[in-house]
Image: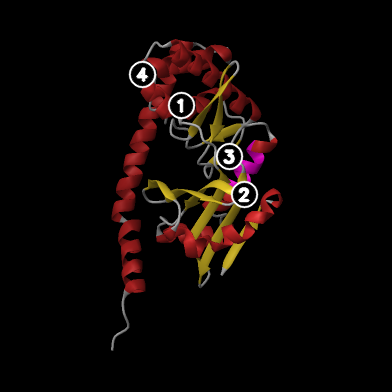
Amino acid sequence: MIKYAVNSSFINLKDFSLSLPDTFNHIGKVIQDHRNVIKKITNEHGSFVVKDYKGMYFFNRLGYSLFSLSKAQKSYRNSEFLNKHGIKTPQHIAWIDCYNYGLLQRSFFVSALQPFETFKQFLARTPIGHPQRNLLYDNFLAFIIKLHTIGIYHDDFSITNVLVIPSENGFEFSLVDLNRMSYRKSPFRKSLQNFNKLEIPTEELYNLISGYAKNQGQSAEEAIKMFLADSAKAQAFRRNRRALRRYTLTPLENLVRKLRNKEPKK
């Protein structure tokens, strides 16, 4: 069984979108292939980015099937919200969920292609101290402040999930990988943790945090101390969670996988 939605502005892409469960493995150019697969696909209608959320643990599948929207649906919904609030993100086109016996198996999110480099790629080719790099950070700080003022908290806010768009006055930014977002105006200390996944040089990170703190009327020095303390706690929590999963859920998921793959006895 398939559930789906197609943006009314892209209704001509309905057939293409609904064909993805059958065609995705054989078309397009792979951009990323980890637990999930991202491809650039070009056809007579243009170029698109399709993300296949196939890398789900059994209990994730169960949760998405019974209690929660799929990652593709969340990405589509979040893209709608961002576009309505003037935050750039690749235009949402469709989501497609594939079920077998009521259990979510695969989930696709289709978006328009934005041919811009990521924040990470920009930093890799622009030396520290270069005027364009400094301008990038100035504009990026303003972008973060705008997000938090609106009440947008991107839980995967990393330099690979932000596209850099050159503009007349410097740089604008576009958000990608949208399935983990929340809408809340967070307290200052919580907002600081949105910098946690920005893998940039330490001095540049501290400069960003200091600039953010000053904008919020807070002490830059105290903000950095809070950030470091909370980041250490978050890392410890993630380590403990991985260890707990390794000895609890993972064995159960492996057992379920074996039972599902086991051939009937002759």
* Nearest to the observer: residue 18 or residue 220: 18
Residue behind mark 1 = 195
Residue 9 in picture, x, y percent from top left: 70, 48
Task: Examine the structure image and report whether residue 187 is included in the region drawn in magenta.
Answer: no
Vertically, is 261 above or below 89?
Answer: below
- Rounded to the nearest angstrom, the CA distance separating label 3 from label 4 is 30 Å
The magenta span reads 75-82
> Which amino acid is tagged 3?
Pro
For image coordinates 51% across by 35% down, the residue present is: 115
Q: Quick check: marks 3 and 4 in contact, CB under 8 Å?
A: no
For image coordinates 52% across by 42% down, the residue present is: 180
The numbered mark, 2 or 4, whose residue comes first in the sequence reads: 2
> Which amino acid is tagged 4?
Thr
Secondary structure under the numbered disc 3 in the rendered image = loop
Residue behind mark 3 = 90
Residue behind mark 2 = 93
- Rounded to the nearest angstrom, the CA distance separating label 1 from label 2 is 29 Å
Magenta: main secondary structure:
helix
> Which amino acid is tagged 1?
Phe
Badge 3, how many Cα within 10 Å: few under 14, some, many 20+?
many
Q: Depth-wise, is mark 3 or mark 4 nearer the camera?
A: 3
Query: Split into 4 quadrants, where in the image is the N terminus?
Result: bottom right
